Amino acid sequence: MKVQHLYAFNTPYVFREDVPVPRPTHAYDLLIQVDAASYCHTDHVLASGEMATVEMPPFPLVGCHEYSGTVVGLPPNSAQTEFKIGDRVGVSSRAYHPCGTCVECIEENTPDSDPKGYSVLCPHVKTNGIGMDGGWREYALVDARQVTPIPSGLTQVEVAPLMCAGITIYSAIKRTELEPGQRIGIVGCGGGLGHLGLQYATAMGLKVYGVDNADTALALARGLRNISGATIIDARTQTAPEAIAPISKEDNIAFPGQFGLDAVIILPESQKAFQYGIDMLKNHGKCIVVSFPRQGLHVSSQDLIFRDIKFMGSLSGTNKQLREMTQFSAKHGIKPEIKTFPLEKLNELVDTYNAGHGGKLVIDQHHKSS
Ligand SMILES: [Zn+2]
Ligand SMILES: [Zn+2]
């Protein structure tokens, strides 16, 4: 089969056509024909050798941890799986063969938790597309418990970017626990996660404030059709206090710290973006951090203690949330902005990403060259 291999950090991907198709042997293995496989910022970080995790990629590695496909092979005992040949599935980044017995796997303490015996946070898993082969190949083995059925109304190409970008921003918004009508900020709103976040937050009935600082990102955010009522802010021309000044009038509260956003989500790997988001919050507001700069982020005592800002990180969602997010996307017509490439042109896709192209770049196995 055709694959794209990464042989070492900071080298181009190498296209090969002589790799054997894997076979399902484990009780939860599904063999899928990959239809679409999307590029995530983490792929860039991984290929640069900059991943801040203990999991080293096994070279040669097939990257990509957000993809979709069609089931073509079932586990040895197929009675165990809800899936059948021909089903369309989305594949998310985590939890291939979780151990089923660790603390993470056996705890089920919130309605959003993974089912007992399964956890995306199991420390014994290999991560799809990072610690084991992922989606830039014709066929892939996936864990039936890590995938979501694709509802009608969404194509495989549309679903692939939702499998990391979509679930990550969706679960980060859920972490704010905001009610409809409350105010949320998304810093980095014109990127892959951000432009989906604007759509999810709007569909959830929140008052949305998007912030970015680049022309292409701002244009992408402002061009979204389904974010009516959202305020898009150019951080180069407006300070955070200026951006939230209209809220003082709307709520008729003049005292600083007592008006502002209820929660903010930080997507860029930048101290400046982090502080901009915090400065938009009212006192006691929540700051959800999704980015993970290697050097970490600095929190001021003023914000932490005297303003009682609550900080929380967010990695990815559970499998229950993955399915919920996919259904929610279909129901509300939430789709990523996409540019597609054939598998052979993965390096061209990476060049396009590095040039600052907005939205999501996706390998489409059925790509018709124009
Ligand atoms: Zn486990
Ligand atoms: Zn990702």
Image (cartoon, rainbow, N blue to C red):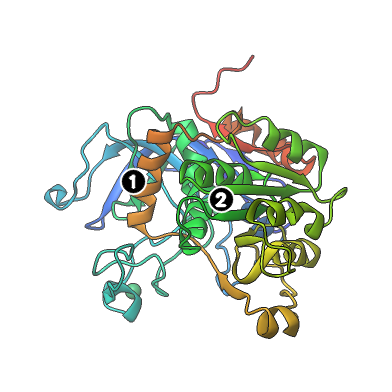
Q: Looking at numbered disc 2 in the image, what kind of residue is underneath it?
A: Gly
Q: Residue at x 57, y 63 (%)?
A: 57
Element on which disc 1 rests: strand
Element on which disc 2 rests: loop
**Can the viewer see residue 18 in this picture?**
no
- For the residue pair 201 and 116, the one nearer the viewer reads as 201
Of marks 1 and 2, the one in the foreground:
1
Q: Tell me if 175 is positioned left or right of 81 in this view.
A: right
Q: Name above or below for residue 181 compared with residue 98.
A: above
Q: Looking at numbered disc 1 in the image, what kind of residue is underneath it?
A: Thr
Circle 1 crowding by C-alpha within 10 Å: few under 14, some 14–19, many from 20: many
Can you give x and y, in whole percent of width and height, for residue 274 in the image?
Answer: 73, 65
Can you give x and y, in whole percent of width and height, for residue 155 in the image?
Answer: 42, 29
Q: Quadrant of residue 96?
A: bottom left
Q: Residue at x 67, y 63 (%)?
A: 259
Identify the mark nearer the N-term, 1 or 2. 2
Q: Which mark is residue 63?
A: 2
Q: Which mark is residue 166?
A: none
Q: Name above or below for residue 153 compared with residue 361.
A: above
